[in-house]
Amino acid sequence: MTRPRRELSAAEVVELHERLERRLEKLGLETQPKVAARLLELTQNPKSEIRHYVEVIKTDWTLTGRLLKLANAAFFAQRSPVSTLDRALVVLGMERVKAASLGFYLCRAAGGGGAVDKNLSRAVWGESVYRAGLCSALARKLSPQLGAEAFIVGLMLDCGQPLMGRLLGESYAAMRTAHDSPAKLFAAEFGSLEFTHVDVAAVMMKRWKMPGLLARPIAWHHSLPQSGKTADPSATLQRLAYYAGAVQLSAAGVPVQSAPLASIANRLFEIDSTELTGVIGKATAEYRATIELFSDVADAVGQTEAVADAVQVQLVQLMDEQMSRSLFAETRGGPRRFVLSGQLIDIEPGRDGEVLAVINTEKGEPVISCTLNPATDGAEVLCSRLGLEQVDPLEMQNLMTAVRAMAA
């Protein structure tokens, strides 16, 4: 007979998480067909930039986690942990982001789960997008430098709930419906179930090798933080997570009240109800704008099989592009190397007047890549896509001259 989570010791919790991890190896989080459809649109648009991918990918906790894990891999040798989606996509480069994202959706499109699982996943997704926007809006007011991290934390607060449905069946969906606030739901889980959605989220953070700065606030978002001023970014993120994770949302995915949990917000953030109302309003506007991103593709992909087919086509096209670039490089003299801001940058011919630029390590391992069209893209675009700063003008001029000559 299993014991409720509240009765477990610290050592038993460690054993519980190990068991959960083994069970989760056989499952996968539901992904959102709308997100996949929007991602497909971006891959078909040659003018899509990293910021467009960030705008879409940030709304899917599973894909965000996988890309952060990939960006933090030893292969990319980052000096500090990658904790924002923007930086992760810069580190990975456009082509790798496309391939990883589309491959992920292809893998997940055939995933299991019945109607109850899908309904739960869709409901939690919508709420998570709002909580992400709320965390981000609060961070912009309190600690602007943590805005990107705050969005990821908010997005992933409840990422364990869809898996709770997969692990426990319809009884969990019924439990979630019966408790109209996050605090009541967590209390019910803690008092009657062997594990909670927070335990599942904590295990997922471990599997994704999420940086501690992000993992700790997610794992402790139902634990009351200390009040008072703090310069610790992890403590700040936990406060944001605690508040955003406790706000009760309506069926439309927005707060039931205009200034919810005002006393808690005042204690944690030292803001009054008027300021809180403004923050809630901004977060609600951002949420509606984000959801609007997917409105025109809401009915574009009605079945996961259709997503799988479309993704497969895109993957084949990406492989064709890679092969074509290799052929162009062989017939047009191969790549050229430049040093820019201390970085080793190789350029090689692409397709249809484009040039591929790649930052490599001294061992020749690719770190960041992007595609340029010299007819429309200038030096500032190259710097933005490769994350270059304080570039010597003469070095940049020499590089761009070579890029234009190669594309001619």
Image (spheres, rainbow, N blue to C red):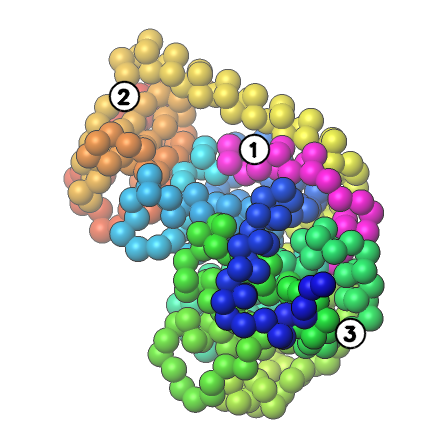
Q: Residues within 10 Å of mark 1 (few under 14, many from 20)?
A: some
Contact, mark 3 vs mark 2 (Cβ under 8 Å): no
The part of the image, by quadrant, that contains residue 8 is: bottom right
Q: Earlier in the sequence, mark 3 or mark 2?
A: 3
Amino acid at the residue labelled 3: Asp
Say which residue label 2 marks: 335
Alpha-carbon distance for marks 3 and 2?
60 Å
- Image: 143 above or below 151: below
Where does the N terminus fall, quadrant-wise? bottom right
Residue 321 — which label? none
- Which residue is rendered at x = 79% and y = 41% of the image? 299
205 or 51, nearer to the observer = 205
Contact, mark 3 vs mark 1 (Cβ under 8 Å): no
- Magenta region: 99-123
Say which residue label 3 marks: 180
Amino acid at the residue labelled 1: Gly
Say which residue label 1 marks: 103
Answer left or right for 399 relative to 200.
Answer: left
- Which residue is rendered at x = 67% and y = 70% of the image? 4
Q: Earlier in the sequence, mark 3 or mark 1?
A: 1
Which label lies toward us, 1 or 2? Answer: 1
**Magenta stretch prevailing secondary structure:** helix
Q: Earlier in the sequence, mark 1 or mark 2?
A: 1
Where does the C terminus fall, quadrant-wise? top left
Alpha-carbon distance for marks 1 and 2?
28 Å
- The verdict on residue 108 being magenta is yes
